[in-house]
Structures are given as C-alpha cells and as structure tokens.
Amino acid sequence: MFLGHFGLAYAAKRAAPKTSLGTLFLAAQLADLVWPFLLLAGVEKVDIVHGATPLLNLDFTSYPYSHSLADLVLAGALLGAVHFIARRRLRDALILALLVPSHWLLDLFVHVPDLPLYPGAATRFGFGVWQSLPLSLALEFLVFGGGIALYMRATEARDGVGRWAGWSLAAFILLAYLGSLFGGAPPDTRTLAYSALIMWLLLPWAAWAERHRARKE
C-alpha cells in the first residue's frame, strides 16, 4: 500500500491536532522511508520481475528489518517516547507509536505473502489484494480520500498558501502513486532506491503547508 499510509496519517490529525502533519507522515511511512537506505546498503533485497503482480513489477524478496512487525512496533515505541519527552503530549505520542506499525497492518491486506513478523521469521504474511488491480485501486483511493477529507474538515487554510500547498501535496502524492503503477518497471534496484528517497521531501513539504493552516474549533 502507498496512498493508504498517507491517508491514515492525514486522518490521524484529528486525533493528534497539535502534531505536525510532517511528523505524522514520518510515522506512517517510516518503513518505506528507511527501506531504500537498507536496499542501497545491500541489507534488504528486491527483485524487478515484470508482471510480478498486476500492480507492481517488484518482488520484495527480503526486507526483514524495515517491514517486520516486531521492528515497527519497537520503532513506534521509540518514536512515541521521543515525542513525549520533547512535547509532553501523551495522546499524540501514543498516536505516533501506533502509526508506525500500522504500516505493516495496512500492507498486510495488499501484499502477497512477503511480510515477516520479525527478522529471520520463515513464515510470511499477506492477503494479496495486489493480485487485483481494481480492488487495489479502490482500497488505496478509499483510505487516501477518506483521510484527506477528515484532515480538511479538521483544518482550514489561513491564507492562499494553505490552500494550494495542501492540495498540491495531495496531488503530488497521487501522481507519484499513479506513476509507479503505469510508468513501467525501474531499470535496476539502485534507481528504484534513489527514486524512493524522494519521499523524504514530503515531510518538510507537509510541515510547511500545515503552517499555513489552522485547526478548526
């Protein structure tokens, strides 16, 4: 899943109104933000296989750290603890702690069985919604659109920047997703990893856009 993780981060703004949208993005997408670094380091592996699923030309053969449930639970607890120490907002810290492993739970629905419970686990999990392009798109758009709707209802633009920066961010995420589906397979895994690093730019973009929005009372 791709859009759905961002959708859940948008929706979480209602539960954690004082936490930056950029921080919520970080929590919800931490697995995919870390993954390209591990891929470049050779710690994790993906194979480019044309037609691996109707949705992607990728076979995630090994990501025991970035996408294991145990590691994401641990990373979520660490992120939540750091946030609580820095901000002293318990509810927001708990939301962040839950958002990190939510990545695994959302991926569970769409991935073919390739998700480990912990590093080194032999059994992999995944319900395989990726095998159906229409169902995958419907699920992604439902969670993404629902999350944005909740976010927009919880906040309002303070100026023109708040309007266009927020919507352009959502549009960019959507276009990036569609490009990954219909833009063809990457030429090699290093190109894939470097292109995935672009997602880090969405964090300051989200934080900047939100500075021009205000919470609705």
Image (cartoon, rainbow, N blue to C red):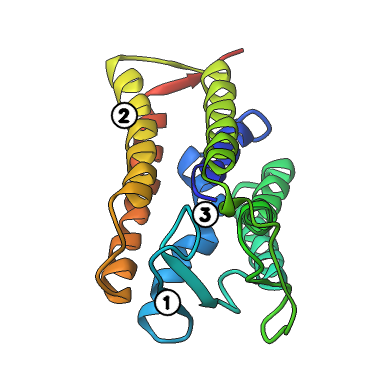
> Residue 62, located in which quarter of the rendered image?
bottom right
Mark 1–mark 3 distance (CA, rounded to whole Å): 21 Å
Residue 93, percent from left and from top: 68, 49
Q: Are marks 1 and 3 in contact (CB under 8 Å)?
A: no
Name the kind of residue labelled 3 in the image: Gln
- Of residues 66 and 162, the one drawn nearer to the viewer in this rendering: 66
66 in relation to 14, above or below: below
Quick check: 138 left or right of 210? right
Residue at screen point 68% across, 52% down: 109
Mark 1 residue element: strand
Q: Secondary structure at mark 2?
A: helix
Which quarter of the image is occupied by the C terminus?
A: top right
Asked if 65 appears above or below 204 in the picture, the reply is: below
Provide the residue designation for mark 2.
168
Identify the secondary structure beneath mark 3: loop
The picture places residue 71, in percent across and down from the top left corner, at 66, 72
Give the mark, 1 or 3, whose residue is nearer the N terminus: 3
Q: With 164 as the anchor, is 6 left or right in this view?
A: right
Residue named by callout 1: 47
Q: Amino acid at mark 2?
A: Ser
Instruction: Name the N-terminal-most of marks 1 and 2.
Output: 1
Viewer-side residue, 53 vs 44:
53
The residue that label 3 is drawn on is 29
